[in-house]
Image (cartoon, rainbow, N blue to C red):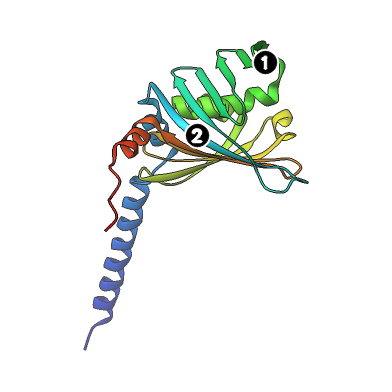
Amino acid sequence: MISGSKIRFDRWCRALLAALALSASSAWAFDLPELMGLLAQQKSGEARFTEQRFVRGLEGPLEASGVLSFTAPDKLVRRTLAPRAETMSVEGNTLTLSRGGRTRTLQLDSMPELLGMVEAMRGTLSGNSQGLQRYFRSTLAGSSGGWTLDLQPVDERLAAQVRTMRLSGRGGEVLGIEMEFIGGDRSVMNITPERAAAGSARTPARSAP
């Protein structure tokens, strides 16, 4: 016959083990500072992108593709190759747009809603959590092997344009950006780092049996 003290001791042991397991799980949880640390290690990079923009009232998405490049701390270039060539370059507070041989330069602080979207990308790519949290409330899920970062605008002018942003990636690489705009429009961008793209290009095709 098992005594009452023995039962209480067993319950106490089980409770202690459960508490230790919960504590260990929390201690090793993947959090925003850890993600920002991984991202900050990438001082520069280049990647291919494909983008689909879903616009209310239009059948099928608008598609674009090109090359993205980033140089820490704040230079971001999007070079669209299709359906038409155009380049958007951001460095510091200056935005430069080039299309069809014409160039236009703007100051980002004159367009707070655009500045917020740019800072979301630059803040994530550079691992600058302070810049990111200035404009967004963030929720991180997953692990270093595969994560998603949901961003909710806190700036009123940005929130009037953008409902949510979701960035996804692996380790210190951003592999996808989804944006949902006020009014129902949505864009989905898939990103392939140049290293991965080059590796797949070098993989020989298998011959047919």
Relative vertical location of residue 64 with respect to residue 101 in this rendering, above or below: below
Q: Is residue 73 left or right of residue 112?
A: left
Q: CA distance from mark 1 to mark 2?
A: 27 Å
Q: Quadrant of residue 37?
A: top left
- Which residue is rendered at x = 37% and y = 49% of the image? 26
- Which residue is rendered at x = 43% and y = 18% of the image? 72
Q: Is residue 147 visible?
A: yes
Disc 2: which residue: 49
- Which residue is rendered at x = 43% and y = 40% of the image? 169
The location of residue 7, given as percent across then percent down, is 28, 77
Tag shown at residue 109: 1
Q: Identify the image quadrant of the N terminus.
A: bottom left
Give amino acid for label 2: Phe
Residues packed near mark 1 inside 10 Å, few (<14), some (14 to 19) or many (20 plus): few
Q: Nearer the viewer, residue 170 or 18?
A: 170
Q: Is residue 99 left or right of residue 199?
A: right
The location of residue 137, given as percent across then percent down, is 59, 37
Q: Secondary structure at mark 2?
A: strand
Q: Secondary structure at mark 1?
A: helix
Q: Nearer the viewer, mark 1 or mark 2?
A: 2
